[in-house]
Amino acid sequence: MAVYDRALVRLLPAVPKPVVRRIADRYIAGTRLEDACTLVTRLNAQGKLATIDILGEAITSPDEARAIARAYHDVFDGIERNGLDANVSVKLTGLGLELDYDLCHENLEFVVRHAEVSSNFVRIDMEDSSTTDATLALYRQLRAAGLDNVGIVLQAYLRRTLPDIRDLAPLRPNVRLCKGIYVEPEEIAFEDRQAIRAGFMAALTALLDGGSYVGIATHDEFLIDDALRQVAERELAPTEYEFQMLLGVREPLGDELVHAGHRLRIYVPFGEQWYPYSLRRLQENPRIAGYVAADTVGRLTGRGNHRGR
């Protein structure tokens, strides 16, 4: 299967854009802010929260990075104007991290301070391991500046995650905990499925024991069951944690969580850079190509899990 998935990835750049767009359509809100707001309105009506992300990691200049930072102001305005229950997620490479650390800090603080004025919240996304130290450093800088409306993402498959949780404990960080998707060397990340699950459960335990608010970001029913056990044992109220899922993925499972009274937040990406985003996600983890192929077959045969528009 791995050979098959890698072969699919090699063929992706040759696939016509309209075909890739059709595949990506259920996982991306659209190209415009209005598309994201319309979708989030529907999600809110279903009892679901949202986090909005502007696609734009492939930036090559400071001006592009500043433009993305300014675009987040429009997102906050759109959230407020439409009365949406949503916050935002930012990728630091989109704000210039790979160009200049200080530029990224300037742009990130610009976004977080605007969110503070709007009584909103910013999640700093976590990317590949080459950015982890800088991402955590920027998070610490914002917290040291008195900005508490900002959270971080930790990836359970990284061997460093439990030590990072211990180091961050005094801040009682608001954390999105996910497995992790980037392809990393074995010395940096666990590769075995069970080891990754064990890392996720241990990280969740450490975060909850430390009093953190955790966005439990997984589609793995085994991990969801463990999370439900952990929050029940601690007698946590539904406002003290949440589950998070990707747009268009495992929707019936998400509906079950909502109907059971749990908070569920859906990750809603949008933007003109949907194409490089789609290719990059597949190239970073060839296994996803197999999932996409299976899903596409399901859509064409009428067995896919479609999102109504």
Image (cartoon, grey):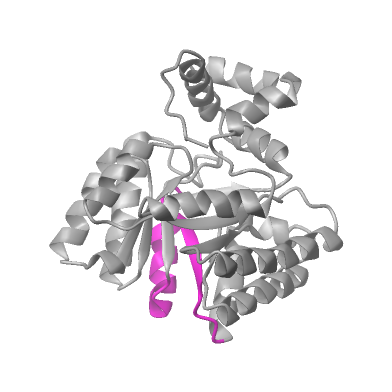
Q: Is residue 134 above or below residue 56?
A: below
Regarding residue 175, the answer to whether it shows in the image is yes
Query: Where does the image place residue 206, in percent across and percent down from the top left?
Result: 30, 64
| 128, 44: nearer the viewer | 44
Residue at 33% x, 39% y is 220
Left or right: 230 in relation to 92: left
| 241, 281: nearer the viewer | 241
Left or right: 228 in relation to 183: left
Regarding residue 265, the answer to whether it shows in the image is no
| 79, 285: nearer the viewer | 79
Residue at 59% x, 27% y is 23
Left or right: 285 in relation to 10: left
Q: Is residue 303 above or below residue 191?
A: above
Residue 8 falls within the magenta-colored stretch: no
Residue at 53% x, 48% y is 39
Residue 163 falls within the magenta-colored stretch: yes
Left or right: 44 in relation to 40: left
Where residue 20 sits, quadrant-wise, is top right
Residue at 71% x, 20% y is 15
Query: Where does the image place residue 57, in percent across and percent down from the top left?
Result: 70, 50
Query: Where does the image place residue 91, in percent across and percent down from the top left?
Result: 63, 57
Magenta-colored span: 146-173
